[in-house]
Amino acid sequence: MQNSNEVPRYKRILLKLSGEALSSASGTGIDPDQVAFMARRVKAVHELGVQVGVVIGAGNLWRGKIGVERGMDQSTADYMGMIATVMNALALQDALQREGIVTRVQSAIEMNKVAEPYIRLRAIRHLEKGRVVIISGGTGNPYFTTDTAAALRAMEIGAELLIKATKVDGVYDSDPKKNPNARRYDRLTYQEAIVKRLEVMDMTAFTLCMDNNLPILVLDFWQEGMLEAAVMGKAVGTLVTA
């Protein structure tokens, strides 16, 4: 529970969620219970007065790599993934609105029947009005990951922090599931992450954040209170800065 007198350190954040976060234990499909859980997490931060933008992946519905390995054209595989992110965004929007949070879905690939086209100034206006904005459709171009889409949209909407939500409580020097002695980093510089070859985000997204001095916070989205603590500026997860 946060002290009611505390003021969030960050006014506007971009939350990067994986598609698998919406899935059941099998890692595929959309699990309504998981989506509802995520909506409650986002609601808790929104109620602190933080403006929240969300970019969501589609690994629970489609992995373009699998198609490419079987001979599918890379662009086709990537466009299928971008369309799948819209399905995830609509599921999360529905859950958020049932929690009483006014939410807008925007898509970099136009599909006006179900989502607004992504327009930077319109997204900012929604945030200023207290709406959660879920930006789907990736970058609208093939060959880019949703990590890169998250970094790009965070810059465009003027987010002060990019939060990468994971099931691990930060960045480690090795896989903590395989190595019980793995060391977790509280803070890293961009250069340290590169030199140590730590997989914070894909390199295109990471370089974009580094070049524009956008802090990246990697945290355990599923741990109670972590997201709220993060926006209050408390030491949770791993913070990557200049």
Image (tube, rainbow, N blue to C red):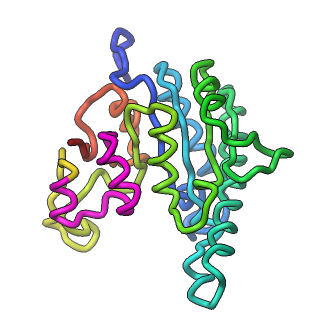
Q: Residue furthest top?
A: 5
Q: For the N terminus, which image quadrant?
A: top left
Looking at the image, which residue is at 37% across and 20% down? 8
Whole-percent x and y of residue 209? Answer: 35, 47
Q: Is residue 32 magenta?
A: no
Q: In the image, is residue 219 above or below residue 196?
A: above
Looking at the image, which residue is at 20% across and 42% down? 242
Q: Is residue 203 magenta?
A: yes
Q: In the image, is residue 150 above or below residue 203?
A: above
Whole-percent x and y of residue 170? Answer: 28, 52
Whole-percent x and y of residue 199? Answer: 30, 63
Looking at the image, which residue is at 56% across and 57% down? 57
The number of callouts visible is: 0
Q: Going by the image, does 114 lie left or right of 108?
A: right
Q: Going by the image, does 4 lie left or right of 89?
A: left
- The magenta stretch spans which residues? 191-215
Q: Residue furthest right?
A: 113
Q: Going by the image, does 195 lie left or right of 222?
A: left
Closest to the observer, 37 or 18: 18
Q: In the image, is residue 55 above or below residue 66?
A: above
Q: Quadrant of residue 83?
A: bottom right
Looking at the image, which residue is at 76% across and 43% down? 115
Closest to the observer, 196 or 60: 196
Q: Residue furthest bottom?
A: 70
Whole-percent x and y of residue 86? Answer: 70, 53
Closest to the observer, 36 or 148: 148
